[in-house]
């Protein structure tokens, strides 16, 4: 086993907890975890509001590409609920099952025929250099105009022409024209695509309960909470309260752009590369409700909203994930809104959310709003811009020369491997690399990470 000396982990979200878990498992004791907030979980934390509603920072669910990750979750004292995904697209005053292109038989005849003509004329993704062109070449004009253009402009909050294509992988269901034609002929809903077609969720405490249990298993002595990093010098971290922490190796899950800004000893090229990284912020609006659910809500898990009447791109029926996400006699909706310099969010957005939820039939005229919860994350989506990979190819080697390894959703800045399982395994795998136990397939080969070709047995002891 290699000796990486004293290891300091910055961040107690899934990535930092994955690194700590693997270090403990391999018997490495010279490490500590610094977390700027007062509790673990990062972007996967949960909150209990004063009215008794539980909220996540967005519509998180548990599905996995890794046996190792599954085994860790199975070791936790969590009671799980298991769900068959019901996700839908609200378009033209009707719900269409996801994946949208597989279910265009649900559209009215004019829209259906236009969507099919576009699919039949699509040329494939060869030669597409940006996400907008990729959508057109894969799906044609009909589906692009009905769903994929307006939805993706909402969620990314940056021009689609600035976004690359290498990240797409399993994130966007590819069209299968023969399958779509069969569905049209048989008028059949086709909803099984994707790795999250089934998922699980904790009965109690939201997604954050998972990460609280991981932290509890590691032991309170592992963590220093409320430790906000202010600057990083060679071999030493300076905290906002004046303390310093020495390290031989640093594993960081803070946003890569912030890490570079705080770190001395990097070249001007690294500073320029970090300045080119782009992200969007996320607002989560939780609406706690009392009264009968409209029929439109039913057993749905989440819904996509491409149209301009609503500010949100996705709404989750969070009480359907677990009845204990809401107090007795209540239920809950959770709406997500993205923000960037290209797409501002106004002060009255909550009122706009409530108005749109009523317009879209998700809140009935007699339903009582008993709780309004709002949360903003400055770093919500790491945008896979065209120049992102060039920037990462400069930044990661420079940081590693200083003994700094930046991993996780915003640490690696790779949206395609930024789910909870991916992020946890990035922490596990960087420890394997540092201690001479393996490599980092999730970080370096995202397409294989998502295919499951060789990662199922990763990080065996």
Image (tube, rainbow, N blue to C red):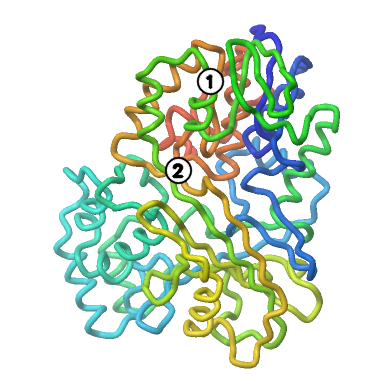
Residue found 51% across the figure and 69% down from its top: 349
Q: Nearer the viewer, residue 87 or 71?
A: 87
Q: Quadrant of the N terminus?
A: top right
Q: Nearer the viewer, residue 312 or 118?
A: 312
Neighbour class for label 1 at 10 Å: few (<14), some, many (≥20)?
some
* Residue position marked by numbered label 1 in the rendering: 263
Neighbour class for label 2 at 10 Å: few (<14), some, many (≥20)?
many
Quarter location, residue 144: bottom left
* Residue position marked by numbered label 2 in the rendering: 382
| Position above or below: 116 against 175 | below
Quarter location, residue 311: bottom left
Residue found 51% across the figure and 81% down from its top: 355
Secondary element under disc 1, as helix, strand or loop, is loop
Give the left or right position of residue 416, taking residue 373 as reference.
left
| Position above or below: 165 against 61 | above
Q: How far apart are marks 1 and 2 (CA)?
A: 20 Å
Give the left or right position of residue 97, taking residue 135 as reference.
right
Secondary element under disc 2, as helix, strand or loop, is strand
């Amino acid at each position: 086993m290699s000796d990486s000396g004293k290891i300091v982990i910055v961040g107690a979200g899934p990535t930092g907890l994955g690194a700590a878990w693997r270090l403990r498992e391999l018997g490495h004791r010279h490490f500590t975890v610094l977390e700027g907030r007062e509790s673990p979980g990062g972007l996967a934390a949960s909150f209990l509001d004063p009215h008794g509603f539980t909220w996540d920072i967005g519509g998180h669910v548990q599905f996995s590409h890794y046996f190792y990750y599954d085994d860790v979750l199975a070791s936790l004292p969590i009671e799980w609920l298991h769900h068959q995904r019901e996700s839908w697209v609200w378009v033209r005053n009707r719900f269409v099952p996801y994946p949208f292109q597989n279910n265009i038989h649900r559209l009215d005849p004019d829209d259906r025929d236009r969507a099919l003509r576009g699919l039949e004329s699509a040329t494939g993704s060869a030669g597409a250099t940006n996400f907008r062109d990729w959508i057109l070449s894969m799906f044609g004009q009909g589906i692009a105009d009905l769903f994929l253009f307006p939805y993706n402009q909402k969620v990314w909050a940056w021009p689609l022409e600035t976004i690359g294509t290498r990240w797409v992988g399993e994130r966007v269901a590819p069209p299968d024209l023969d399958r779509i034609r069969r569905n049209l002929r048989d008028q059949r809903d086709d909803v099984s695509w994707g790795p999250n077609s089934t998922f699980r969720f904790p009965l109690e405490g939201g997604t954050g309960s998972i990460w609280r249990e991981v932290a509890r298993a590691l032991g309170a002595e592992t963590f220093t909470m409320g430790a906000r990093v202010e600057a990083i010098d060679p071999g030493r971290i300076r905290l906002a309260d004046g303390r310093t922490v020495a390290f031989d190796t640093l594993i960081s899950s803070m946003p890569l752009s912030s890490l570079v800004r705080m770190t001395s000893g990097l070249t001007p090229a690294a500073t320029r590369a970090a300045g080119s990284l782009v992200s969007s912020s996320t607002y989560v609006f939780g609406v706690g409700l009392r009264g009968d659910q409209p029929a439109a809500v039913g057993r749905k898990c989440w819904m996509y909203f491409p149209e301009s009447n609503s500010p949100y791109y996705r709404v989750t029926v969070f009480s359907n994930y677990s009845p204990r996400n809401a107090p007795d006699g209540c239920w809950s909706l959770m709406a997500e809104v993205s923000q960037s310099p290209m797409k501002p969010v106004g002060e009255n957005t909550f009122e706009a959310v409530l108005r749109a939820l009523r317009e879209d039939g998700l809140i009935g005229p007699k339903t009582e709003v008993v709780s309004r919860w709002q949360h903003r994350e400055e770093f919500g989506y790491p945008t896979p811009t065209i120049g992102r990979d060039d920037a990462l190819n400069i930044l990661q080697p420079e940081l590693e020369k200083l003994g700094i390894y930046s991993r996780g959703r915003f640490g690696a800045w790779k949206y395609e491997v930024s789910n909870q399982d991916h992020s946890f395994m990035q922490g596990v795998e960087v420890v394997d690399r540092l201690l001479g136990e393996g490599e980092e397939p999730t970080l370096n080969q995202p397409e294989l990470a998502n295919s499951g070709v060789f990662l199922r047995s990763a990080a065996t002891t």
